[in-house]
Image (cartoon, helix red, strand yellow):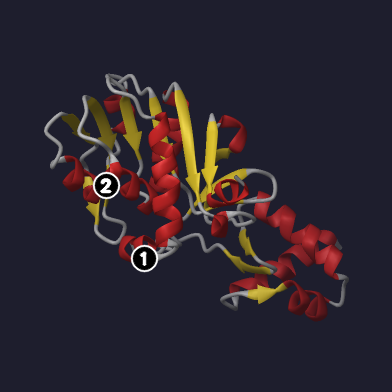
Amino acid sequence: MKSTRHQDLIRLLAASDWLTTDALAAELNVSKETIRRDLKQLQQQGKIVRHHGRARAIHPDHRDGGEPFGARLKSHYADKADIARHALDWVSEGMTLALDASSTCFHLARQLPDIALTVFTNSLPICHEMAKRERITLICSGGTLERKYRCYVNPALVTQLKALEIDLFIFSCEGVDEQGVMWDPTPHSAGFKSQLLSRASQSLLLIDRSKFQRSSEVKIGHLSQVTQLISDVQLARR
């Protein structure tokens, strides 16, 4: 019965954009608790996305579900800038940093002092920002430019990283679910972050409160892999 119910859930979700837990429970004539358990299992299998009591299916050909960089930059602007400012405490002269193409890391890049650093990134806006710093050595991942996300996709990333000793990887993500799994909307973004997580000596996750209890299309890894997390939730408690 559970297997049949899971198939029915996928069918219902595939036919809609988002459906609530209440609507799914009513449609299948089961309790909301049962639906929540089913959705949790389907999420762990990478078949659906859950967010604030709603769910939708992940289509096999879905590769472009994230928001454009410009829209992300405007969202939670002040919170992201504040999170980035606190991340500066982790940066010391002489370090080699890796920054992802997130809007929060762009806020960080804008605040980085012009000191002796090496910065590796796949972000076009961060490359432009680092080009203004005389003392910072910039290494761009290169590759094919994804204009929507303003980042580069490079299939030779593994080979490229072999020559780099990353002291600190600073990144954000689309969401962190109830199990502590980090998610991103595209395979190339999640893959970039997974590789840097495994390569860097330390890692720093910058995440605003809207990203908690939220999943997306592709798993990056688990919070247990991250050295430290900085969020506006933490900062508000201080």
Q: Residue at x 49, y 54 (%)?
A: 174
- x and y percentages locating residue 219 in the rendered image: 54, 45
Residue sitting nearer the eye, 207 or 196: 207
The amino acid sitting under disc 1 is Lys
Q: Residue at x 60, y 78 (%)?
A: 15
Contact between labelled residues 1 and 2, with CB atoms less than 8 Å apart: no
Q: Is residue 210 left or right of residue 204?
A: right
Q: To which quarter of the image does residue 6 belong?
A: bottom right
Real-space Cα distance between discs 2 and 1? 15 Å
Of circles 2 and 1, the one toward us is 2
Residue sitting nearer the eye, 1 or 57: 57
Which residue is denoted by mark 1 in the rendering? 74
Which residue is denoted by mark 2 in the rendering? 110
Residue sitting nearer the eye, 118 or 115: 115
In the displayed structure, 73 sits above or below 22; it is above
Q: Residue at x 56, y 45 (%)?
A: 182
Q: Is residue 117 visible?
A: yes
Q: To which quarter of the image does residue 28 belong?
A: bottom right
Q: Secondary structure at mark 1?
A: helix
Mark toward the start of the polypeptide (2 vs 1): 1
